[in-house]
């Protein structure tokens, strides 16, 4: 049997992914972007991000810029207000651990 057209979004390292990257994947899989944006790689190229930086953004390790969020929103037609929520949560957790360790 062949694999499904769109695998459920998961990260090998962190388990289920955050809602914003999931929406990006789902929008691209559904064909929401223009004809030139049919893969994550093409989206990264449109945003002028290298693979490492794009991957860091998608995993919630680094924040999306306002320009990147606007371009994603206008290209894929998805909400971007929670784009950096995972980054902010991870930073808050690290801050809490540091404060508890003092």
Image (cartoon, rainbow, N blue to C red):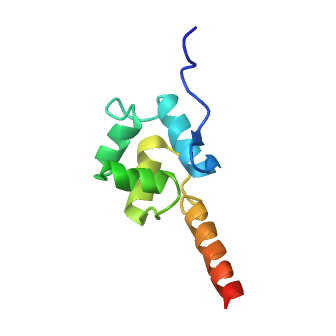
Q: Residue visible at 52% across and 53% down?
A: 59
Please indicate, yes or no, whether residue 16 appears anywhere in the rendered image.
Answer: no
Please indicate, yes or no, whether residue 97 appears anywhere in the rendered image.
Answer: yes
Residue 72 in picture, x, y percent from top left:
43, 49
Q: Is residue 13 left or right of residue 75?
A: right
Vertically, is 40 above or below 6? below
Residue 6 appears in which quarter of the rendering? top right
Residue 26 in picture, x, y percent from top left:
55, 35
Tally the numbered discs.
0
Of residues 36 and 20, the one nearer the viewer is 20
Of residues 42 and 51, the one nearer the viewer is 51
The quadrant of the image that shows the N terminus is: top right
Farthest bottom residue in view:
102
Q: Residue visible at 32% across and 51% down?
A: 47
Farthest front residue in view:
101
The quadrant of the image that shows the C terminus is: bottom right
Vertically, is 78 above or below 5? below
């Amino acid at each position: 049997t062949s694999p499904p057209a769109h695998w459920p979004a998961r990260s090998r390292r962190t388990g289920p992914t955050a809602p914003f990257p999931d929406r990006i994947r789902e929008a691209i899989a559904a064909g929401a972007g223009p004809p030139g944006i049919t893969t994550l790689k093409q989206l990264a190229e449109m945003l002028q991000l290298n693979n490492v930086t794009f991957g860091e953004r998608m995993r919630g390790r680094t924040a999306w810029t306002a320009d990147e969020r606007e371009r994603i929103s206008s290209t894929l037609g998805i909400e971007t207000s929670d784009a950096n929520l995972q980054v902010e949560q991870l930073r808050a957790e690290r801050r809490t651990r540091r404060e508890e360790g003092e």
